[in-house]
Image (tube, grey):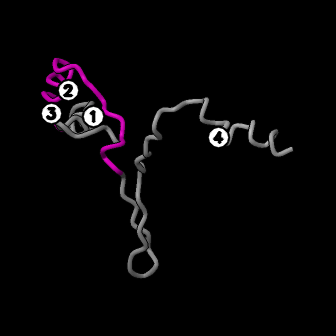
Amino acid sequence: MVAELRALTPRPGAAFGGEPVQPVAPTSSCDEGPGGLWHVELNSETLPRLLVDQRYHARVSALGPDRPGEDLRLRLRWPRPAGW
């Protein structure tokens, strides 16, 4: 029986993978503030980035404040990530 135990692999999972484990960055953090209110903050490093064609950006940016697309024009400030 001792011989059978010694023949076993002590780390059977070592045959799979072998790449080091990559840490996962949190997408947000929550802190309890005064009065029991919670403050939630997004981690801008983990948010997806939105790439917009420069010609389209220039066209939308040229719209006046009373024109359709004003909300989009405000959201396209560079180099802000698209976290909306």
- Reading the image, the residue beneath label 4 is 11
Q: Is 78 a magenta residue?
A: no
- Reading the image, the residue beneath label 3 is 64
Counting residues from the N terminus, which is met first, the one under dot 1 or under dot 3?
A: 3
Residue placed at 20% from the left, 26% from the top? 60
Name the secondary structure under disc 4.
Answer: loop
| Residue segment shown in magenta | 43-65
Name the secondary structure under disc 2.
Answer: helix
Task: Quote the CA–CA distance across marks 4 and 1.
Answer: 55 Å
Counting residues from the N terminus, which is met first, the one under dot 4 or under dot 1?
A: 4
In the image, residue 32 lies at what x, y percent?
Answer: 43, 73
Q: Residue furthest front?
A: 3
At label 4, the amino acid type is Arg
Counting residues from the N terminus, which is met first, the one under dot 3 or under dot 4?
A: 4
Residue placed at 87% from the left, 44% from the top? 1
At label 1, the amino acid type is Leu
